[in-house]
């Protein structure tokens, strides 16, 4: 099946990543005008012919989430009305992913709402990276290719087990599956931190399960924003004799409170993350790994109607 010529466009949320994706597969970035009117409305114009094309629109729906989601919807609609043959929404970070269930009375399932909006706008398929919950794939009535940042992060962290006694920790019970995958691939022990969240920004870590004394600890999580979970876990680990504490997080969306905690608590010796969203290290020990090559390969395979299964494999493991 011929889906037409490959076209890649990007929103304004993460232009550096979009450019890197295009360079990784030697495709020119599509020309589009994306701007905001004085009243805050978004204006989009596709500045080249995409009739019959296989169009990929790259947009992380990070802060400001509402604006970037709306921008993505408008770009999809513009591509649909310009007669693109197939439209794939490439979402390195899927906003509202933590609102994926009805865990309180009279609250929405906003992840499902965003999925409905993407389909209504005209998306034919979605390419996402490290969704907060696996069930979000089922919120879509169109194909979803769900990639993991772990191959990129593994290439970096496998060196951490050399010359050190490494233990992988989950910062909470909910993250055990991800942490277990890292521990299995690195062939190291697994532990977790029992925690209680007292508010949206405050976390009280209160118990450890696993080896700590004299160990190098790698905390694995998918999202950090206020760094409350990470710093509380790191503090408890250090108090119990951890030699060094590192954290690997797929999506680093630190706000001012998060930066302040990392700077003042100093429990995290290194924060390893990806460029799924723009990251400003601000002088902190933050290592940013690029997922551009991973996403570029996925785009190329989807365009050629090939399997993306090989992208889940870890080189050398």
Image (tube, helix red, strand yellow):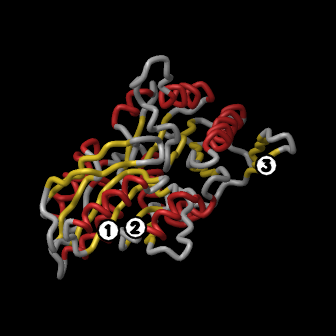
Question: Can you see residue 5?
Answer: no
Residue furthest out toward the bottom: 163
Image location (x, y in percent) of residue 1: 46, 37
Q: Is residue 43 left or right of residue 302?
A: right
Q: Nearer the viewer, residue 103 or 203?
A: 203
Which residue is drawn at the image coordinates 20% and 66% (left, top)? Answer: 240
Q: Position of residue 68 (x, y in %)?
A: 64, 44
The image position of residue 102, as x and y in percent, is 41, 23
Asked which secondary structure carries label 2, the reply is strand
Label 2 crowd (10 A; few <14 / some 14-19 / many >=20) = many
Considering only order in the chain, which callout, 3 or 2, is on the residue closer to the N terminus?
Answer: 3
Going from N to C along the chain, the mark reached first, 2 or 1, is 1
**Crowd class of label 1 (few under 14; some 14 to 19; many from 20; radius 10 Å):** many
Which residue: 47% across, 63% down?
A: 261
Q: Which residue is mark 2?
A: 271
Q: Secondary structure at mark 3?
A: strand
Name the residue rendered at 56%, 72% in the picture: 282
Among the 4 quarters of the image, the one containing residue 235: bottom left
Residue topped by disc 3: 35
Residue topped by disc 1: 246
Circles 2 and 1 in contact, beta carbons < 8 Å: yes
Using the rendered view, name the quadrant where residue 196 is placed: top left
Q: Can residue 270 be seen from the camera position used here?
A: yes
């Amino acid at each position: 099946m011929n889906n037409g010529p490959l076209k890649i466009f990007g929103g304004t949320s993460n232009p550096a990543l979009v450019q890197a994706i295009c360079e990784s597969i030697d495709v020119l970035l599509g020309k589009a005008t994306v701007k905001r009117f004085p009243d805050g409305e978004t204006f989009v114009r596709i500045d080249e012919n995409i009739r019959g094309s296989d169009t990929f629109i790259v947009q992380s729906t990070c802060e400001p989430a509402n604006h970037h989601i709306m921008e993505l919807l408008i770009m999809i609609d513009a591509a649909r009305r310009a007669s693109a043959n197939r439209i794939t929404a490439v979402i390195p970070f899927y906003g509202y992913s933590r609102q994926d269930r009805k865990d309180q009375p009279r609250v929405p399932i906003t992840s499902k709402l965003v999925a409905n909006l993407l389909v209504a706008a005209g998306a034919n398929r979605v390419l996402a990276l490290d969704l907060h919950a696996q069930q979000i794939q089922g919120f879509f009535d169109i194909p979803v290719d769900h990639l993991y940042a772990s191959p990129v992060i593994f290439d970096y962290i496998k060196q951490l087990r050399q010359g050190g006694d490494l233990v992988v920790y989950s910062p909470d019970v909910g993250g055990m599956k991800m942490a277990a995958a890292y521990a299995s691939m690195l062939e190291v022990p697994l532990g977790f931190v029992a925690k209680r969240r007292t508010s949206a920004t405050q976390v009280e870590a209160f118990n450890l399960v696993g080896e700590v004394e004299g160990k190098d600890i790698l905390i694995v999580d998918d999202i950090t924003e206020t760094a409350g979970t990470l710093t509380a876990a790191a503090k408890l680990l250090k108090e119990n004799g951890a030699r060094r504490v590192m954290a690997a997080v797929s999506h680093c969306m630190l706000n001012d409170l998060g930066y302040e905690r990392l700077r003042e608590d100093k429990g995290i010796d290194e924060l390893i993350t990806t460029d799924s969203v723009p990251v400003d290290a601000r002088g902190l020990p933050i290592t940013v790994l690029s997922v551009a090559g991973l996403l570029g390969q996925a785009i190329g395979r989807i365009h050629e109607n090939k399997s993306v299964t090989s992208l889940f494999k870890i080189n050398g493991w």
